[in-house]
Amino acid sequence: MSVLKVNEVSKSFEHEEIIENISLELHEGEIVSLLGVSGGGKTTLFNIIAGLSMPDKGEIYLDGEIITGKPGYISYMLQKDLLLPYRTILDNVALPLMIRGEKKQVAREKASEHFAEFGLEGTQKKYPAQLSGGMKQRAALLRTYMFSEKVALLDEPFSALDMLTKGTVHEWYLDVMEKIKLSTLFVTHDIDEAILLSDRIYLLTGKPGTITREIVIKEPKPRGKDFNLTEEFLAYKKEIISHLENSDKL
Amino acid sequence: MKRKSQNITNKIWSCSAIVVILIVWQAVCSLGWIDSFMLPSPIQVVQAFIKEFPTLMEHSFVTLAEAFWGLALGIALGFVMAVLMDQFEAVYKAFYPLIVLTQTVPTVAIAPLLVLWFGYEMTPKVILIVITTFFPIAVGLLNGFRSADKDSIHLLRAMGAGRWQIFRYIKLPGAMSQFFAGLRISASYAVVGAVISEWLGGFSGLGVYMTRVKQAFAFDKMFAVIFLISIISLLLMKGVDYLQKVCMPWDKE
């Protein structure tokens, strides 16, 4: 059964269609990427799924229930960590629980249970400014997970990190995902990242943006460090690049 | 470590400047270039300060009480105004120009009116201080509220946060540094405001003391009270800095 379902969603701004007739599904425990060039309407779709803006047409379902235009159901994580500088890491991570009305003490206890799992041990009392970029993204993912253990949206979460950090963060990310089984819709423009992390990839192309292709990455998880050096990886990459190039010409 | 030693060198410079000025001042008086009833020497000022210390403390207490109440009410009013202007666009449009207008009215001009309306007791003084102190607080807070990060607000909304929660978790803590910048100014305004309002009518306070010693041509006492007011203002500003450090532990870096 699908956790999250986007059904025939379209949206235009000032008479210009940004996205057209987008449908996608996210199954339990899956990591699904939405891959497309910048400015292709990824962010628009993203805001609609998060309930921050209304689509012109179409619906969003969470566990079979309509949540179109309603915030408070799906949390997200961006390239910017958006950790509040005046709260400790623990209080940042516990924030979604406190917003939901849990007592401060309870929220803190629940949040601190996951610090070790996310490789954040020892950062509880630090402020975001004292952490490295990679660690901040870890904390941001944990905050997203504290909001919902089921489904999360990630919008280019690692694109601000440098190559080397990105490598270790990817490893960490796959490792954590094995443990927490968070169903994730992962928006990215990084082809390697999409192949490395995803179970399936939707390709978003054209203007207005539509999904023109779905690719299943069959490589079983956990994936080895050198998966991105294998023939299979390159084959996926070629397939994606040629599809993106072809649809650009149209 | 480096910053600390730099700080000390800076202080050495400013301290030596003050010492040089004091020496020159003392020399000018001792050599008889200026009559001592016109300009008392630093030593005379210190003597006057010591002799008058009990009286000065009594008057300080009154002035500080006025400053305290005026500042407390000014902070409260500034806070309420800033919150209302942030939450309701109509309030902002209606009142912001008016608030700016209140700051163009010279305090010395309205103080006598306040005395006529409210008498010689504490009320007119506190009102005057409220008028001068609420402005930096309100403007500082409002700027802080309005410059809150839009992306953070969107994220909290997606997490289901309401207006009040967004205010509490993002806007209010985000405005703290601007609030303290305003408070620093307001704290010194409060003391100066109290003194000015005492000049124009009252029974006790440093401003009343000032008018008395001025009429008696006791310039040594006049300088003593001027320095006392400066010291009080400086101490208040230091106090605000200390309070800021305590309230904003994340700001150490």
Image: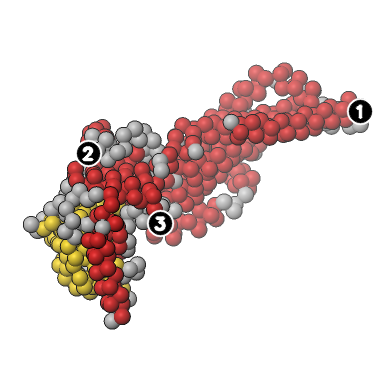
Expressed as whole percent of the image width and height from the top left, the position of residue A246 reads 28, 77
Disc number for residue B91: 3
Neighbour tally class for label 2: few under 14, some 14-19, many 20 plus, Cα within 10 Å: some
Residue A199: image location, x then y, percent:
18, 57
**Where residue A239 appears, x then y in whole percent?**
24, 69
For label 2, the SS is loop
* Numbered label attached to residue B32: 1
Q: Which residue is mark 2?
A: A102
Residue furthest toward the front? A231
Q: Secondary structure at mark 3?
A: helix
**Nearer to us: label 3 or label 2:** 2
Separation of residues labelled 2 and 1 (CA atoms): 76 Å
Question: Residue sitting at 23 percent across and 44 percent down?
Answer: A176
Q: Amino acid at mark 1?
A: Gly
What residue sits 13% from the left and 53% below the top? A28
Q: Is residue B51 above or below residue B28?
A: above
Residue A234 lies in what quarter of the image? bottom left
Disc 1 versus disc 3: distance between alpha carbons?
62 Å
Q: Secondary structure at mark 1?
A: loop
